[in-house]
Image (cartoon, rainbow, N blue to C red):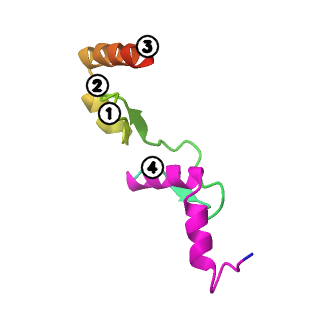
Amino acid sequence: MAKRTGRGSYAHLEWSTNQTLQLQRLVHEGLGMGNWSNTTDTVPVTDSGERLAVLDLSDIHHPRFHRHEEVQKQSSGEDKEQLEGSLRSYES
């Protein structure tokens, strides 16, 4: 196994950063969400009670993460009904 410093460090860091939990951390952190630790370990963690980004399904064919506040501003009763209809269509 390559040492974490020196010749194999970039390959190791790239390999560990491309793991599922690290990719999720990168998405949330890129949106400014969460105070992260263990950022180079297998399981990155946030402080207890941290709010993370939420999945915005306003376009069912292009879901994406947004800051929680942004999704709340975009939501309305009409949008919710339209989303539920889109989800039913998508699931059929």
Position in image of residue 48 (x %, y %): 59, 45
Q: Nearer the viewer, residue 90 or 76?
A: 90
Q: Secondary structure at mark 3?
A: loop
Magenta stretch, residue numbers: 2-31
The reply to whether callout 2 and callout 1 are in contact (CB within 8 Å) is yes
Tell me the residue at 37%/51% (across/down). 31
The residue tagged 3 is 92
What's the residue type where badge 1 is placed? Val
Going from N to C along the chain, the mark reached first, 1 or 4, is 4
Going from N to C along the chain, the mark reached first, 4 or 3, is 4
The residue tagged 4 is 28
The residue tagged 2 is 75
Quadrant in the picture for residue 59: top left
Quadrant in the picture for residue 88: top left
Tell me the residue at 47%/55% (across/down). 26
What's the residue type where badge 2 is placed? Ser
Quadrant in the picture for residue 54: top left
The residue tagged 1 is 71
Residue 46 seen by the camera: no
What's the residue type where badge 3 is placed? Ser
Q: Secondary structure at mark 4?
A: helix
Q: CA distance from mark 4 to mark 3?
A: 31 Å
Q: Secondary structure at mark 1?
A: helix
